[in-house]
Image (cartoon, grey):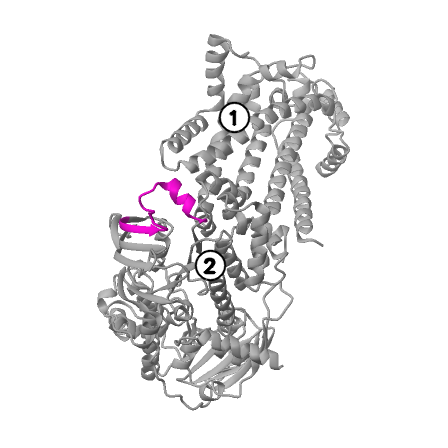
Amino acid sequence: MHPILKLVSQRLALGLLLLLAASALIFVGTQILPGDVAASILGQSATPEALANLRAELGLNEPALSRYFSWLGSAVTGDLGTALTNGQDIATSMGKRLGNTLFLAFWAAVVSVPLAIFLGLLAVRYKDRWPDKLISAVTLTSISIPEFLIGYVLMYFIGVKLGWAPSVAMINDSMSLGEKLAAIALPVTVLTLVVLAHMMRMTRAAILNVMQSAYIETAELKGLSSFQVISRHAFPNAIAPIVNVVMLNLAYLVVGVVVVEVVFVYPGMGQYLVDHVAKRDVPVVQACGLVFAAVYILLNMVADIVSILANPRLRHPK
Amino acid sequence: MSDPLLKVCGLKIDATVYPPDAKPHQIKIVHGVDFELQKGKVLGLIGESGAGKSTIGLSALGYGRGGVELTGGEVWVNGRDILQGGIADLRKLRGAEVTYVAQSAAASFNPAKKIMDQVVEASVSQGKFSRSDAEAKARLLFAKLGLPDPDNIGSRYPHQVSGGQLQRCMTALALCPEPDLVVFDEPTTALDVTTQIDVLAAIKEAIRDTGVAALYISHDLAVVAQVSDDIMVLKMGEMVEYGPVDQIINTPQEEYTKALVSVRSINNEEKTPTAPILSAKNITARYKGTKFDVLHDVSIDISPGQTLAVVGESGSGKSTLARVITGLLPPKDGSTDFAGRTLSPDQPSRTKEDLRELQMIYQMADVAMNPRQTVGTIIGRPLEFYFGLKGAEKHKRINELLDEIEMGDGFIDRYPAELSGGQKQRVCIARALAAKPKLIICDEVTSALDPLVADGILKLLLNLQKREDVAYLFITHDLATVRAIADSIAVMYQGKVVRYGAKSEVLSPPFDDYTDLLLSSVPEMNLGWLENVIATRKMESAGN
């Protein structure tokens, strides 16, 4: 077996195992929360009989282990159960929300990843000179300000004062792509500002690390220009650490947009999760947790696999 | 005489240093050097580390490594003073008119790109040749340099070829753009002697056939003598002697050059073996997770107060043998007897007495010491650990040990970073000696040192052996060192001992094939040695 296939399949198996462990944690976590679903549905005035009936109906009297496996079993087949609060199928109502969240995350990534890598390369090219310092200062400042604050500031100045972009990011199916993009311009900007610094700093550090290597001197002594040296010789050897931090940030874009979605009233997963946490709707919270965990694990697995593929020693064994 | 290709006048080079306890400041590393090089000639630059040879070599490309700056003088290449132009002019020069072969090809090739892409890159991006012409040229060079499968080797990645082959690829890289001058910076230093001789011959032939001029930098005078027309001897950034190779080798004028030529003047009377202090029996070993044995049935004896030299190329299993004896790698088979008892195969279950009597000194003294401990702490540690010495008693013993390694008590509060390479190795010797061992394993202890410094260390080790009656297991790839200090020798090849016995027996004919190859590959300080060896080998292989 080719060593790469072996490594990649190992990573895939590990990813699945990790997802299983995450599902168990999510389940246990929601179980040890104080209070009880039946009580929260029926409210304070519920009679003990009504509570007992509802518990039996919801299957809450079964042992935890069997409830976990039946939940996991149906989750694997795509059935995430029904929401306690409104009786809707979770998979259906979440599907659309997840689509919206991925749409927002995708466009934020399309803007931020190339921009971060380009700024990183630029910072290396002008290391310790003003462009480097300016890039670092701006990105570090933007990462240090909480995203909801950036969100409200942009909303006020760009949305309200200047009127360049809508300050509420409502989208629906009847809108064209252009209209949707215009609607999400501000949240995309906020997300980009939040994730830019990490990726740009890592690109800079990874490439600077590679720049110490003897083969960079060889490239310089071939008479190549600084940018050729960086892009042809340093960047290919810095892919692995860069991809890792890019994937971590992409995962953050999907999982961590909760705050930004709420600020901009965007109909994504974040809004959905926050609504149902407030209503103590445990099946929905579990389902959201599972989806977030899957996205996180998947993206990190992709990062691992890309790092493996980027290593010529593994790609072309002796 | 025509105008010289390369003319260097009054070259001055500074470097910024960052000492541990002072502000960064500039020091002069080359103080005004002059030389000329005609088309098609080879100038050898020789000196110890810190002599400024590489720095001078790189100045021909207008390049300063790290904080190095060319601060004065002129460097004329093809009638232009390259220090006057800007970086754009230098880029046109580099990789086109002047190219560079680095010491470690393994580190100097980009691991992420195919060899061919890197070999033709300079020619193509400098606009000298089209991609296909450059590739055709590269294939011719691969063939000329004796690389296997010259048509396809370029499509491999650097890690897929051996160190010696990669060094030839680096030479092809430098010759591909048809430069006027190539700077060879210790191109064979990192190679085994048996590989070095082939690469050296390939480089020499390529220089002759292409008619390119070269600066050949090395610390090994015997190597430089084989390829150069003229030699310049450098010391501490200053020229010591400059002349035709014949004059430098045969009638050196300066004391320093004489010392370089006659290095390794140690003469050690061979002792007759007695009842062994250590005897390793039928050792077979492999590393965890691998499927082949690194050592096959190795047996050696060491007599008390004597030196057994284990000699072989990299990968022959010398250091693995040391790991087995010290218990760091428990063997698959075989046992080790030491001072009349059988040692436990793994280090953690050995007694304190076993550990004390068996000490080790390493190749890289730098990394074998904690940089944040003073010399006194480093040497004092075994005194505390094995003998429970404290306070004034410990201090006194540390001073005695410092005297033994000829350093004196002024060094007790110094940190490793403040010591020279030779001094660091001496501290490591004192640390091993502090345990009053019966046997010290010396793993390539002089390999990282300059010849004259290494000589001092070897003399010290021999004196200590006489005084303390300690035995050495001396691991080395350098046969000159073996000649100087061994009482008996074990020649290792591919995990086996191929020749074993008293020094006088091992080093006298008839030889087995491998020992013959090894001995004849050691560069000798006479002109034409390389040609003679190559011719002899060709005749032998034709005769077979």
Q: Is residue B320 left or right of residue A58?
A: left
Mark 2 belongs to which subunit? Answer: B
Label 2 secondary element: loop
Question: Which residue in the rendered view is the most extreme toward the front?
Answer: B1
Relative vertical location of residue B126 with respect to residue B326 in this rendering, above or below: above
Identity of the residue drawn at 36% across and 83% down? B469
- Amino acid at the residue labelled 2: Ser
Relative vertical location of residue A197 with respect to residue B480 in this rendering, above or below: above
Identity of the residue drawn at 35% across and 73% down? B246
Residue B491 got which mark?
none
Q: Can residue A308 be seen in this view?
A: yes
Residue A72 image point, x, y percent: 73, 35
In the picture, the quarter occupied by the C terminus of chain B is: bottom right
Q: In this view, does B154 lie to the left or right of B444?
A: right
Residue B185 image point, x, y percent: 41, 59
Residue B83 on the magenta span: yes
The residue identified by callout 1 is A192
How packed mark 1 is, by other alpha carbons closer than 10 Å (few <14, some 14-19, many 20 or more), is many
The residue identified by callout 2 is B104
Q: Magenta segment range?
A: B71-96
- Alpha carbon distance from label 2 to label 1: 43 Å
- Amino acid at the residue labelled 1: Thr
Residue A317 on the magenta span: no
Q: Which image quadrant for residue B215? A: bottom left
